[in-house]
Amino acid sequence: MLDLISQRPLKQVGPPKVGTMKVQSLRWLRIGILALALFAVVALVLANSVAHASSLGSSTPPPNAAAETDTSVPSRQSACGDATESATPVQLGKDQANKAKSISQQHMYAIDAATILDWEKANVAVASEGKVWVTVAPVSDPKETPQNFEFYRIAVDLELSEVVNVQTYRIGQLDPATGKYESWMLSDGELLWHGHVDKEGNTTTAPDSPMDPAFQTRGACEWGVGALCGTGGAASCYGVCLGLGFVNGWAGLGCASVCGLIAALGCTGATNAICK
């Protein structure tokens, strides 16, 4: 079941708007800028994923039944590579996760009531104390053949009870001639990045793109695994990987390994095991 794949046609993205971003939004963009590499980049770490999983041994925490909700922040370099996340675990209770979803749901309905989002399978991940990411995708029909997909990463400040940034990620169909997917990243509705992503996670920035993120393998891996966590389960996670074309050879096996780790260890445990 391809829970993240949207059935709606790709929206037309016009020329980028020129303006000054809010400082608050930029703070959130710093840690989310690499998510366009998302599912494709997982294939890059297949060779190490199984080894990392076996090396966890007895020190690995028992499987968490609520694997789709990330409850702590590991100590690691941020996606942009110029700052480190807090080494102190930040706990996120069920009430806080539900609050984050509720705030996000109200905000998204206010700006686009026509899009039905799958909030039951939304993922809530801690960014820092009092601040979380909510990852959610439109409801999709598994009986339909996917043409493209879209998902949202919503930055929520729980202390202020408000959404501070909405990032939209859109990926079109695979171009057989180039082996790449045309991709867009928007921030609060404004085009932030436009280009192409191949199955290995390599990116090519389009001439009309207003920003060329400094993609780094480590950060892309972390956010790629994080995006897969947002599918809500191992079966859905694997389906999304297959939907992106990871069907044959080691790439398909890579999806199975990564999604299995997510189901067994949760988002944080899987990220630590895979993205070392």
Image: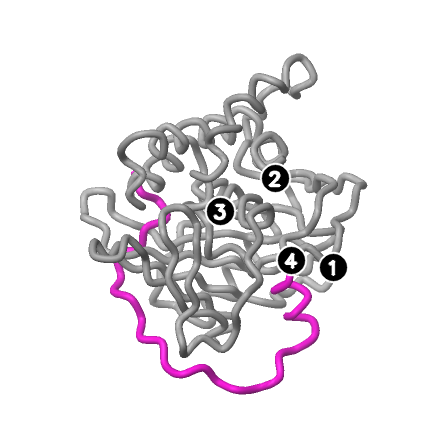
Q: Is residue 250 above or below residue 184?
A: above
**Numbered label attached to residue 70:** 2
Mark closer to the chain start, 2 or 3: 2
In the image, 97: left or right of 114?
Answer: right
The answer for how far apart the CA atoms under marks 1 and 2 are is 19 Å
State which mark lies toward you, 1 or 4.
4
Residue 92, x across and y down, in percent: 69, 42
Q: Which residue is mark 4?
A: 80
**Numbered label attached to residue 159:** 1
Tag 1 and tag 4, C-beta contact below 8 Å: no
Is residue 24 magenta-colored? Answer: yes
In the image, 204: left or right of 216?
Answer: left
Tag 2 and tag 3, C-beta contact below 8 Å: no
* Residue type for callout 1: Glu
The answer for how far apart the CA atoms under marks 3 and 1 are is 24 Å
State which mark lies toward you, 4 or 3.
4
- The residue sitting at the top extreme is 58
Q: Which residues are magenta?
A: 1-30
Which residue is pictured at 39% across the width and 56% down the height?
197
The answer for how far apart the CA atoms under marks 4 and 3 are is 17 Å
Q: Which residue is mark 3?
A: 227
Q: How many marks?
A: 4
